[in-house]
Amino acid sequence: MHRLTGKTGEDSLIEMSPTDSFNDDVNGYHHHASSSTGSPEQGRSEIDKQKYSKDSVFFRDGVRRIDFVLSYIDDKDDQRKQERRRVYESNLQKVGLELETEDKTESEDGKTYFVKIHAPWEVLATYADVLKIKVPFKVNDIPDNSEIPMNWLSTPFRLPGHIMNPEPDYFTAPFNKSKSDFFLIEDKETFFPPSTRNRIVYYILARCPYFKDECGDRDKKGIKRLLNNGTYTAAFPLHDSRYWTKSKDPNCESERFSLYKYWAKFFCFFKEQPLNLVRKYYGEKIGIYFAWLGFYTEMLFFAAVVGTICFVYGFLTYDDNEWSKEICSEEIGGNIVMCPLCDQKCTYWRLNITCNSSWQSHLFDNVATVFFAIFMGIWVTLFLEFWKRRQARLEYEWDLVDFEEEQQQLQLRPEYETKCTNRKLNRITQEMEPYLPITSKCARICLSGATVLLWISLIIACIIGVIAYRLAVYASFASIMKNNTATNLDVVAPYVTPQLATSVTASCINFVIIMILNLLYERVAIKITDMEIPKTHVEYENKLTVKMFLFQFVNYYSSCFYVAFFKGKFVGYPGNYTYMFGSSKLRNEECEPGGCLIELTTQLVIVMTGKQVWGNIQEALVPWLMNWWGSRKARSHPESLYSRWEQDYDLQGFGQLGLFYEYLEMVIQFGFITLFVASFPLAPLLALINNIIEVRVDAWKLTTQFRRPVAAKAHSIGAWEEILGGMAVLSVVTNAFIVAFTSDMIPRLVYMYAYRTHDELNMKGYINNSLSVFNISQFSQEERPEEYPSWFNSSITTCRYRDYRYPPDDKKRYEHNMQFWHILAAKLAFIIIMEHVVFMVKFFVAWMIPDVPSDVRARVKRERYLVQEYLHNYEVEKLKIQLSQNSNNDCTCTPMIYPSLSKHEVLSECL
């Protein structure tokens, strides 16, 4: 036995001698012909490939399972790639993996080679010990006494028992190769499920070097680098069958078919998700995503119900809307002349033209809006707290309780091991381990943070540019439509207003900018995260998540923040308007005639629904079209000749950021339904409908359109949990400000209780009270309209505008009056009261609900106790056997469970 070493004399793989890897007694295999690891020509001389189905997950012998597949196109002119593959595959064989190559003549395109990889029991057991993979040692003996009242009501939503629980419930412990008879091993071939097998093989592939011992280079290591430099074209584990039919091989589980039948079909949308089967097939990381998405969708149901009730309340109180009646009245709204909305190109207009928008605004801007904003602040806390409990239960059921410690100690990223040349003593393990000096780490973090701030500043600059565009073209659209109403635009003129034209074109420009910046920033974020050299995979994903979310947060929410908190707030007043960039001619944008809240609602509906619909179409259609085109030739072949590895090779690869974009999409949606929900109570309903579709679309594309991802462990949703918590706190603030400053709720209440001119407690006279007066003779030449409407005459000497200022005949003319300050004080008082009430309730609810259910805590303690007890009894029994053997044979040799196995050297970097 010897090590695979470079110049440093260190590596992170376990060297296995050829006799260990292919020992018949140890592995349970017959000794196979050398064609498995030799040339394809030799294999074809021994086996006629046309006599067996190639739609199989086994080697040609039908016994050894294919755990991983590598593909490459042999370029005779590129000797470096050939040498890399030769050395890499030779090193894989040295660490115990068994290889079998399919010649390019057997592939559809006639130029692709496929290298099939099998991990024998010896390799699996060794690395399961290194990675501390938990395996069963005793059937769970704790009775499940949880009974749901009226459980029969959920019968239509249930799935068959063998689908929901594909494996019995066991107590588990980290695998120990030297104590393998302690665990419940019935069959070595099926003891480790395929997801665990491909995880172990990928762990080896990611750390195996492709250099010779005498000319080692520490950077030349891992399948990832070989894929990047084109040595291999793909590396993936196999699906176990076609998704629409079971495998003809009785030894194949056909779990992919079960997932498609019971989970990925859209007509299963009302059924529960088979999360245990998803976890068994795809691994815990993908399983935890679908568990979170399903739980989020369930909780959205309650928010959608309350939001719909609030919307219905606004609809039922439609006729009680006194201020809208005044706006629509010919006697009141028809006689109120409003000041122009822009300089020169815009003219005077009557208030009653905003009749429709004022009625629409009442559907969302009513008393129920305040209640719903408070409710959502509490709902988001309940959602996060109950998810913590659900997550704790999954951590126990999926053997992830101690995963964080294992992750930090064992699964260092290969890039970290390669790039960190410094070593220091680990005080816990007393072994040398790689580390990144603190000076280098600080410099990398500072450079990364500066890069992120630079790109966020670039987004803000683009947003300011779009706002300047809106201000610049509004007057142009008003002039064009006014001049062409009787000629070219007479059909669409009643529907296409200057505001609509400006908004649509600005939204299109903003969309293009978002897409371009997203595409560029994604690559930048990955590069600067790689530059930081995170230690573990979890740390890498968390760093990338924070960078991408900060960018996407500004990118997607900036337009809503602008409309909610900036548009119409800093416009000045007639005769003294505020202009963008100071002395420029870009007058700050005013709200739509119906107010800013209805515009925020419109913006939210368009961005939220448009993004979700386009996202679902893109997620489902693009992979399907690419797969259909890529496999168009192979579909004409018989099923037995279209090999399992070629079928999967024709599918799309599930990339490193596959789940990241799924989480990002849902978290962005979460922001829409929490940060701005006060402006649109139906947002949770739209999100609920989208998520019901999203679950099945994600399941369908993962099961049918993508290669099988490498199984990975994750004990939580990672940094997304902290992001959701931060957005929950921010949502309380944003909704309080929306109710106070964007809606007209507070001004109406102040008028009704303090400024009404009659004894009855109603809103009569509110419209006249909320509009200030301006003398039109005081307009400057630059502000004065170029043309006047036909109804305008010399008797009209004043116009009205939305503000609370003294009239022109007052000595404090055009200054804010006392009612303005009363309303401002009421708004600030409302914000403080609402925030304190909601935060107090949030913290009380979070304190009342424990993060870990009591029964889960008891099961964890029970399992730890049993591990200690059973291990103690196991050692006692082994000692008794040893003593009895010593007394009978007078033998002093050390007992071994597998005396025929040679010892293996485990390098410190694995620990």
Image (spheres, rainbow, N blue to C red):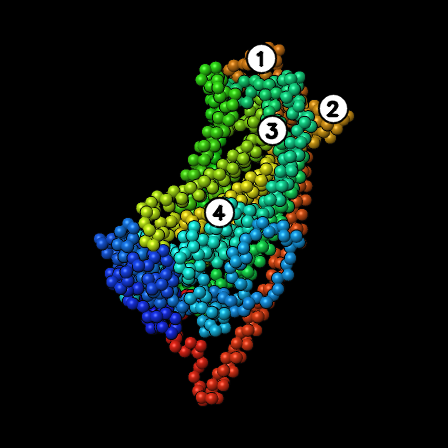
Label 1: which secondary element: loop
Distance from label 1 to label 2 (Cα)?
A: 30 Å
Q: Residues within 10 Å of mark 3 (few under 14, many from 20)?
A: some
Q: Quadrant of residue 72?
A: bottom left
Lower sequence index among marks 2 and 4:
4
Q: Residue 715: image x %, image y %? A: 52, 57
**CB atoms of marks 1 and 2 within 8 Å:** no
Q: Residue 531: image x %, image y %? A: 40, 52
Distance from label 2 to label 4 (Cα)?
A: 63 Å
Lower sequence index among marks 1 and 4:
4
Kind of residue indicated by mark 1 = Phe
Kind of residue indicated by mark 2 = Thr
Residue at left 61%, top 30%?
A: 361
Distance from label 1 to label 4 (Cα)?
A: 64 Å
Identify residue for label 1: 792
Lower sequence index among marks 3 and 2:
3
Any mark on residue 265, and which? 4
- In the displayed structure, 216 sits above or below 462; it is below
Label 4: which secondary element: loop
Distance from label 3 to label 2 (Cα)?
A: 27 Å
Label 2: which secondary element: loop
Identify residue for label 2: 757
**CB atoms of marks 1 and 4 within 8 Å:** no
Q: Which residue lies furthest to the right in this view?
A: 759
- In the displayed structure, 188 sits above or below 349; it is below
**CB atoms of marks 3 and 2 within 8 Å:** no
Where the N terminus falls, by quadrant? bottom left
Q: Quadrant of residue 206?
A: bottom left
Q: Residue 599: image x %, image y %? A: 56, 31
